[in-house]
Amino acid sequence: MKKISILCFLLFIIGMNSFAQKEKPAMVGVYYYDGWSTENRHANNPDAPWAKNTSRMVTKRMIEDFPEREPVWGWRHDTQEIMERQIDLAADNGIDFFLFCWYWRDDKGPINKDLIERIPQHVSLKLYMNAKNKERVKFGFLIANHQGAEITGNDNWTEAVKYWSDYLKDPQYVTVDGKPLVVIFNSDGVDSEGLEKMQEAAKEEGLKGLSLAGCGAKATGKPGFTHRTHYNVIPGYSAGSEEHKYQELVDATKAQWSGTEDQPYIPGYFGSICANDFGRTVPVISVQTVPVFTVRFMPVS
């Protein structure tokens, strides 16, 4: 069967008032979750031949029941060649930046720089930083401060900014209003004082400050968040897996597109993630015609 080109990330678009390409009405970016690197734990098991040359997220059901969904580069994408191919594909199709999902270690503890450098979720970030064509696509961070990677205490948020500083100063790092954009997944995981300390830490590192976008309703009006957005919009997430019209997801997503002058909203377009694709039992609504990319956008203000 014909293979499809799946880059496991969600598409995200922001205003371009601080971006060089003024002729474009918006910057288009994608959330990039690195779930397709490092070896599958069953790869060397002679009783699991399906796992050979696959990544840690691949299940037997994906291989046997959904072979037509294999990406053009196979079930692993953790090579420099593939990253550079992804960059070219993205740039050639209107993508301006990747927002890499970034994970704190240790969970609920102090910073563990060695482990942060070694976890498989950051492999693609390293490949991007070493890519010979990275100037074609900018990059930024989605801070995945959820279960297993929680950042607790304002001092740890300050340490995180210090750790990110070399990335934030990279000329390829995406900015809004001249400040590096940092999107925080769990906006309830940091208080306003912590957000202020993040700004102070950024300035101490020689930056103008940060554009901080909080995900979800709990970021609404919260002092310290300069912007609000979503990582995904999945109506009925906890109700079990069932089939719905795709238009329902479109309508639910568009209903979230609202902001204020003081806290602009970065709207998005989100495709569903069907748990059945992964052979897992997480309750998720599946919808008809699941797209490859999930889109977010914000027009120039």
Image (cartoon, rainbow, N blue to C red):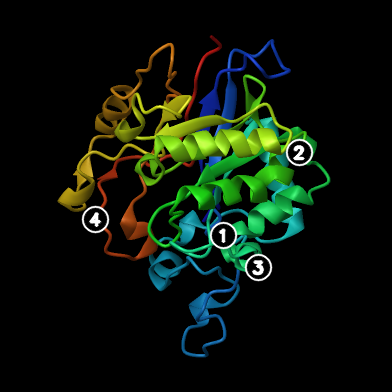
* Residue type of the residue flagged with mark 4: Pro
* Residue type of the residue flagged with mark 2: Asp
Q: Are marks 3 and 4 in contact (CB under 8 Å)?
A: no
**x and y percentages locating residue 221 in the rendered image:** 35, 24
Mark 3 and mark 4 lie on one chain; the one further toward the N terminus is 3
The residues tagged by marks 3 and 4 sit, at their Cα atoms, a distance apart of 34 Å
What residue sits 59% from the left and 73% below the top?
Answer: 39
Residue 24 vs residue 218, the one in the foreground: 218
Secondary element at tag 3: helix
Residue 160 vs residue 252, the one in the foreground: 160
Which residue sits furthest left? 239
**Labelled disc at residue 283:** 4
Mark 3 neighbour class, 10 Å CA radius: few under 14, some 14 to 19, many 20 or more? few
The residues tagged by marks 1 and 4 sit, at their Cα atoms, a distance apart of 23 Å
Mark 4 neighbour class, 10 Å CA radius: few under 14, some 14 to 19, many 20 or more? some
Q: Are marks 1 and 3 in contact (CB under 8 Å)?
A: no
What residue sits 80% from the left and 41% below the top?
Answer: 133
Secondary element at tag 2: loop
Q: Are marks 1 and 2 in contact (CB under 8 Å)?
A: no
Q: Left or right of 50: which side holds 202?
A: right
Q: Which residue is mark 2?
A: 170
**x and y percentages locating residue 159 in the rendered image:** 59, 51
**Labelled disc at residue 121:** 1
What residue sits 61% from the left and 58% below the top?
Answer: 122
Q: Are marks 3 and 2 in contact (CB under 8 Å)?
A: no
